Image (cartoon, helix red, strand yellow):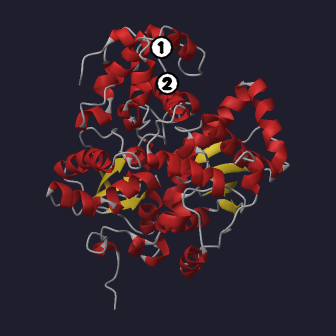
Amino acid sequence: MADIDLSKADSGFRKELASQPGSEKLAACFTCRTCMASCPIGVVNSRFNPFRIIRMALYGLKEEVLASEFIWLCSSCYACQERCPQGVCITDFMTVLKNMALKEGHAPTGIRAQLDLVKGQGRIYPLDDFDNKKRNKIGLPSLPTSCEIIKELFPER
Amino acid sequence: MKYALFLGCTIPARSRNYELSARKVANELGIELVDVESFLCCGFPIKASDMKAAMLMGAYNLALAEESDLDICALCSSCTSALTEVAHQLAHDEAMKNEINAELARANLEYKKGVKVRHFARILYEEVGAEELKKHFTKSLEGLRVASHYGCHYIKPSEIYENFDQVEDPHTLDELISITGATVVNYANSKRCCGGPVLPVDEKLAMAVAKEKLDDVLAAGADAINLVCPFCSVMYDSNQKGIEAAFEKTYSIPVLYLPQILGIAMGFDRKELGLNLNIVKTKELLSKYYEPEE
């Protein structure tokens, strides 16, 4: 991975993050790297390193953090958050970053597709008559194949 | 004991074996599971992209359960954590609750006092208990070596779960398995994630994470994996063949849902527990617990 380039730092990013739920205690990170040692993704891919993401965010490297593919590799397993000796809610912080990145247009296709499915049809796997046929065959009840109420929940769509 | 059954998205479409076996076991134990047709996605899959929308989805489902005056029993660990988290947040943040209720009003719903959210396995452990379960067993599963995969969201984040299990040394699933007579197999890195949430982002990476678990389970000499989440099952059962092909290894480790294992001990037949729907074949492994089929 390339070196961190501080010339691109945005000093307001740290403040912006501090107001987000889950990121309040970010500055308490004392770089012990317990998160890195606990990460199941880091085991198979050294590109992903929660410790590095926290440092980059604290340095104010907003654009680099939000545009980087590695924030999307967090599996939100909470292993780091449970073990952080400083009480940094690392998993919640990663979720905040992912939300910000999506707003800036950086989310992977698969993630955007899931959002469209849920806001549009209420489910990531919308059910059809064939699903109900398979369900009924083994004695499971049918479930609705369409959903109107979702339009009330997300009228802006 | 009566709960609203929360199925979520994955189970009714892709894990009918889990749903079937859970309904059978619940019925045997006298747990009434009520179907609420208007339940939708729990919100978990969109938390990464839109936290506010995810919370609204969670609150919508909670409000529906409350309207029926029922607490929620979820089978999926991700649904359990998403719904528990929203219930926890709304119980502690009145302003947030008002904001969410303003949105729920469009669907003619209001979330008031709050509902309890429980994973099915937690209900079995805490509310049914080992002694009561044993009364319903007709077969001993002695000789079956089972490695439990707790996964992440069944027990984490711990702050929303009242420490019903221990995050760094979980035991609830192993205890439920051991009362059937089966042997609990300990294995390295047992607390590691299945990789499922990364699947829509980087399939190869998700498979590599799941492979680590299969390697550890194989090395410990387990006959089968026991789990309680359909996401984890997609990684270990549905994708096991793909992992074998990608990494040129052979595992052939059957992956069973907890109620399937308990259901075998209760004397249900293969089809009643959806064992014929598991991707990695279970017939040979379970042959000593069933009469040979015609």
Q: Position of residue B37 (x, y in %)?
A: 71, 63
Crowding at mark 1 (Cα within 10 Å: few <14, some 14-19, many 20+): many
Q: Chain of mark 2?
A: A
In this view, the residue in front, B216 or A19, is A19
* Residue drawn at point x = 76 percent, y = 38 percent: B114
Q: Chain of mark 1?
A: A
Q: Position of residue A128 (x, y in %)?
A: 60, 72
Mark 1 and mark 2 in contact (Cβ < 8 Å)?
yes
* Residue drawn at point x = 54 percent, y = 32 percent: A99
Q: Which mark is residue A26?
A: 1
Q: Position of residue B131 (x, y in %)?
A: 52, 52
* First of labels 2, 1 by sequence position: 1
> Tag 1, which secondary structure?
helix
Q: Which mark is residue B274?
A: none
Q: Is residue A14 left or right of residue A74?
A: right
Amino acid type, callout 2: Phe
What residue does disc 2 label?
A93
